[in-house]
Amino acid sequence: MGIGRRRWRIAAATVAASVSALLLGALTPAAADVDTDTSTNDRVQVDHAMGSQIRKHEGDGSTSYTKRRALEPQGLNSDGARAYATVPGIDVSSWQGNVDWSYWWNQGKRFAYVKATEGTSYENPYFAQQYNGSYNVGMIRGAYHFALPNVSSGAAQANFFVDNGGGWSRDGKTLPGALDMEYNPYGATCYGKTKAQMTAWIKDFHDTYHARTGRWPVIYTSTSWWNQCVGTAGDFSSTAPLWVARYASSVGELPYNWGYHTFWQYTSSPIDQNTFNGSYDRLKVLATG
C-alpha cells in the first residue's frame, strides 16, 4: 500500500505540472499581445515642454485674432519707451523631433529657443538637430532649462544646463540661456517651497549661470505662477530679461518689478510661438551681450 500510494502521488504531481504548463502556454500569447511599451509614458514623466504646465493650469485662449495682435508692439521696451517693433520666433523641445527649420524661416521666424535639459537627469535627444539646425538656417537661437526646484539645488541645475548645451558664446547668434519656471508637473504648484525659498533657489541658478557664462539667464514664467510662488520676495528685474507666457491678445500684467518684457510666448498652436519686444537689431544686441 505504501509503494502504491507514493506512485499515485507522483503521477498526480506530474499531471498537475503538465496542466500548469499548458495553462501558462495558453496565457503567454495573450500576455504578449498586451502593449507594454511605456516609452511615451516615461517620456511624459521626464520631458516637459516650455509652457506645458502653464497651459494646463491657465489654459490657452489664443485665437487667430490674438495671434495677430501679439505681433504688434505692446507695452514698453528696454529703453523705457513705447515698444515700436517685434521679431517673431518659436521654441521647441523633443516633442517636435527633427524640426524643418527652413519651413519656419520661410514663415518669418527669426529666433528660436531649444530645450536642452530638465532637472539634473534629462537631456533633449533632439537638441543637436534643433539647436544647430536653427543656427544653420540663419536664426538667432538659445537654449532653455525646465526647472525642478524640488529635485536639486539651483546651482546643480545651472551647471547641468551649461554642461549640456545651455552655455553662451559671443558669436552674435547665441541668446543667453533661459530658466523655465512654471507649475510643478508632479504635485504642489510651488514645489513645496515658500516664496523666500523659491527666490533663493532661482538666485542660486541665476548666479551660477552668470558665473559660468558671463551672462544673466532669461527667466521664463507666467505672472500668475510668479505671484503665487515668488511674489515680491524676489526681484530679478535688473539683471534677468523677462520672458512672459500669456495666451491672450495682450501681454497683461508683468511679474513683480519688471517694467517691460523681452519675450512673450503667446500661443502653442501649431507650435510654441513668441515675439521679441524690439527690433531685429536689438535682438542681435541681446545675443552679442
Image (cartoon, rainbow, N blue to C red):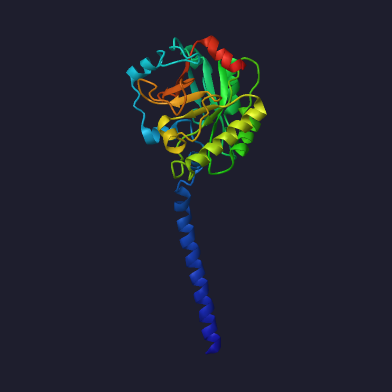
In the foreground, 114 or 275: 275
- Image quadrant where residue 114 sits: top right
Please count the marks in the image.
Answer: 0
Residue 10 appears anywhere in the view: yes
Residue 178 location (% of width, % of height): 55, 27
Residue 109 location (% of width, % of height): 49, 15
In this rendering, would 164 be left or right of 224? right
In the foreground, 26 or 193: 193
Residue 138 appears anywhere in the view: no
**Vertical placement of 264 versus 51: above or below?**
above
In the foreground, 195 or 61: 195
Quadrant that contains the C terminus: top right
- Image quadrant where residue 238 sits: top right
Residue farthest to the bottom, as pictured: 1
Q: Residue at x 34, y 26 (%)?
A: 61
Residue 239 location (% of width, % of height): 56, 24
- Image quadrant where residue 151 sits: top right
Q: Residue at x 47, y 24 (%)?
A: 258
**Vertical placement of 180 versus 81: above or below?**
below
Residue 22 location (% of width, % of height): 48, 62
